[in-house]
Amino acid sequence: MKYETVIGMEIHVELSTETKMFCGCANAFGAGENTLCCPVCAGLPGTLPVINAAAVDYCIMAGLATNCEITRHSLMDRKNYHYPDLTKGFQTSQLYYPLCRNGYVDIETGTGVKRIGIREIHMEEDAGKLVHPDGQSCSRVDYNRAGVPLIEIVTQPDMRSAEEGRVFLETLRNILLCIGISDCKMQEGSLRCDVNISVRPEGSEELGTRTETKNLNSFRSAGRAIEYEAARQVDVIEGGGRVVQQTLRYDDATGTTSALRSKEDSHDYRYFPEPDLMPIVVDEDWIARIRERLPELPETKRIRYERELGIPGRDARMLSSSRRLSAIFETAMAAGAAPRAAANWLIGDLMRMLKDRLLDTEEIGFSGEDLAALIALIDKGTISSTAGRQVLEGMLDTGKPPSKLVEELGLTQISDADALREIVKQIVRDNPKPAADYRAGKKKAMAFFTGQAMKRTKGKANPVLLQELFAKELKK
Amino acid sequence: MQLYEYTAHELRSLLRSGEVSAAETAEALLDRIAGTDPQLNAYITVLGDAALEQAGEADSLLKAGDGGALCGVPVGIKDNICIRGVRTTCASRMLENFSPPYDANVIELLRAQGSVFLGKCNMDEFAMGSSTETSYFGPVRNPHDLSRVPGGSSGGSAAAVAAGSAVVAIGSDTGGSIRQPASLCGVVGMKPTYGMVSRYGLVAFASSLDQIGPLARSVRDCAMVLDAIVKGDSRDTTSIMDAQDGFEARLETDMKGKRVGLPREYFAQGVDEEVRDAVLEAAKTFESMGAVCEECSLPLAEYALVAYYLVSSAEASSNLARYDGVRYGYRAHGAKDHEEMFVRSRSEGFGREVKRRIMLGAYVLSAGYYDAYYKKAQQVRTLIMRDYAALFNKYDFLLTPASPTTAWKEGARIDDPLRMYAADMCTVPVNIAGLPALVLPCGRGEGGLPIGMQIIGPARSDALVLGAGYAYEQAAGGGALRPVEVGGGQG
Amino acid sequence: MERKQIEDLAKLAKLEFTPEELDRFAGDMGDILGFVDKLGELDTKGVPPAAHVSGAVNVLREDVPRPSVPREDVLMGAPERDESGFIIPRVI
């Protein structure tokens, strides 16, 4: 029996606004415990919330960037439950009228382009942080994070593999980084992902029972968790059992999921519209203003790269999906680099180097101008393209500009014809047999000659020039 | 005349002219509290030294010709309104030792006036009640008859004003909590249009119904307080930002030609005959001033009470969820984990009526019942608002009783929640629709117990409502009620 | 109302009651809810719920920081605390 994995995700994104969702406390990471609080976010009696206008704008931006419909008449709702990190005994969220609905994100995997539906994006607030010191019978609470604005992005259960899950997360993250509403750092908790996984026999239309998996610290973990949980569920079913609907915790070290101690069988959150907050009515003007503010989205870039710059489809997708890569690309072109050349360097060699170093595109430390300078050096013949690769590595590792690296590494190509002519003459003289072979028509012998010259010059000779000089010399 | 017998507007003249000082006035009030509170229990906290200090500051302002209309006037503050550094208990064990680190908006405004805070007035726990018998700090007694309730939940505020242990008081009204005790204690009380007074700093009971308002011994005093506390507040998004001020300035209102509606549902069975008669007498007074009074109908009146209990309980159950013993308030000792701490702190910290409302609220919102109960109640609320709007197309204001009966004996209804809830039938529809309403005395019933009438106007017609009340007051020969002798009643 | 229903509600509301209290509750709430079923008499098809009375919309706040309050103000009401945080019994 073959099984199909069905995956949906709920992604919480901390917005990079200046202030919290409902009060003027700073929205900042790493401050001293309980120093970013006020009576409102601490939930003191008598206090009232006031919605952060920027948070609404950011949510609309996220909606527009993921092709959602923006709800014209939206409300905040109270989600009632008790937990020590929740200061009001309820979380202010949106259930009945989320701000954005029915969008999609296109992803590209090994099998092609696929559309992942976004069911909704809504606004809510974060809770405080609980700490459970080892060996103590108490816990501690810090409310700095309480009230930080969040958007929750809920997908349709459209993903079918760990790869699709991972690629979706990367694509979504790139979009959010591109529009600048969050720094999306999973390690810092500004992007959190819960994965809903179920399995069903291939070909079946019905959805199986799904589990929810939390505690995913990276996109890689998300991928692994999906694989593990799908396999686990298949085992359960094949073993004659039934999958239990529950919340699981993924453990990165062991790569397994385990049940979180269930508090209540079902959570009755008793949602009702927040009486302290007025409705949010979004009109065409508001949407138009936000649209104007939006930077060029990855999808639009991709189309432009393909159609106007002639970058092949796959390369265009890769370039456009990363905020940093596309920024470097465009700056390089502005500094005079040819589009195809710039693209090739970025997609080919650079991506390889990043992978080897386990680096993110966001961590590229050189600029587009640097790249343009590198390409110019090669075009001019100052260095060979092989040397160029070395320089690129140096740019990545040290951030130094290419001209400096060429100097430091002594990579300047020998392009002085006079200097090379002597060497060429010498080699031809010293190798009569290959010379004769070449003159007889064996053009492959050229490789021998250029190889010898490279050895002699320690790889610094300009290979194109060498060929010219040898060809001339051998004609004689 | 004793200083505590004056109204705020009378004191204003005396203070401005320098005839009396704020310090003397404050002392007189504090003495009056000392003399009456052992019997009334109208105050949970008395701010003796702090009040005298404020009075001193008020005297400086007065000498300099500064300060607002209420400068130097001693005020009682209901104990669900936050004053920085002062115990704000909501008459509950849950907040017995809670001291807020901030002032409510109304407190900021009254401070700016130069008012003097006498203390925190007793109330029903978390404002849930109609008799001030559910207070953790003991019940409040009606100054007219100490064996009877003062009404609730602002019973302490009303009793203090009636007895002269406050010149004016600030209360809160969610289903009638200012107006009903004003009626039972024979004083003037007003609930402004929803949104006129900022709720920032008012410990929430039912967010879409709560409003802060004044209790006093004259309509003019109420207008003075409204002038001080009506101001848009960006910290409360339900706050009206463009309210017109000048309530005292607009008190003189010609009643000639005014159309007054008397909704028959408020005069039907359930309302005592003596109450009905007194209010109908008041209608005659309006007619003598040239108004036209006419019976009308608010067909959905009977549903208002039910809608009110569903909506208010639901909102209350959510507003009181924050009391869990973590950050402030009562925490049960020796809990082994956080769950136990939550459950025991809340069960030990809250009284019976509060717990009942929380349970009802949780039920009303719970899965499967939300549509039939909470959502339905909110829809009925829209219908009631439309009912009123239709009436106000025909009438300038409505006249009704403020309470179906006069003050009842302490303990008589506490075990009969339905009967207790029915006490609110005259006042609740007003909160449901967010309208302004003024209550003032219009007669005495058996035993000399006060009867109050209620003037209801369309939204934002607070000045008209006060004007109608003022006209009646002047025509009835009033303008300044005097405090009663505690327990003795006054003829 | 059934006992089990009341117990579940109490769990949601984080309240506990003695058996006598639960029984009395069942009685009280039963009465109140009977009184409540009256609403069913009204036709509310198509009537919008009155979530907000004032009619205002888009009441928002500029994203400009205001100083937070001193930590002491936040912590001072805490039943148990240390210098920088709230202390509670172990969270399950």
Image (cartoon, rainbow, N blue to C red):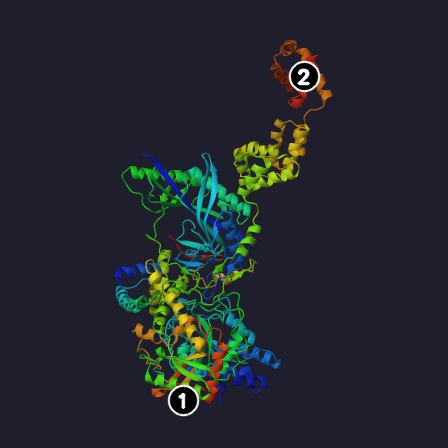
In this rendering, would A296 be left or right of B450? right
- The quadrant in which the C terminus of chain B is found is bottom left
Q: Position of residue B372 (x, y in %)?
A: 33, 62
Q: Residues within 10 Å of mark 2 (few under 14, many from 20)?
A: many
Amino acid type indicated by mark 2: Phe
Q: Are marks 1 and 2 in contact (CB under 8 Å)?
A: no
In this rendering, would A279 be left or right of A425? left
Secondary structure state at the residue bearing disc 1 = loop
Share a chain, discs 1 and 2? no
Chain letter for the residue marked with disc 2 in the picture: A
Asked whether A22 or B140 is in front, the reply is: A22
Q: Which residue is mark 1?
A: B490
Chain letter for the residue marked with disc 1 in the picture: B
Position of residue B318 relative to residue B156, above or below, is above
Position of residue A423 relative to residue A400, above or below, is above
Q: Position of residue B91 (x, y in %)?
A: 40, 71
Q: Quadrant of residue B69?
A: bottom right
Residue B38: in sight, yes or no?
Answer: no
In this rendering, would A82 be left or right of A350? left
Position of residue A211 relative to residue A418, above or below, is below
Extreme residue toward the right, this view? A418
- Report how far apart the C-alphas of labels 1 and 2 lie in the structure: 127 Å
Amino acid type indicated by mark 1: Gln
Position of residue B415 relative to residue A407, above or below, is below
Q: Position of residue A93 (x, y in %)?
A: 44, 56
In this rendering, would C33 be left or right of A329? left
Q: Residues within 10 Å of mark 1 (few under 14, many from 20)?
A: few
Task: Indicate which disc residue A255 carries.
Answer: none
Asked whether A295 or B199 is in front, the reply is: A295
In this view, the mark in front (1 or 2): 2
Q: Which residue is mark 2?
A: A470
Secondary structure state at the residue bearing disc 2 = helix
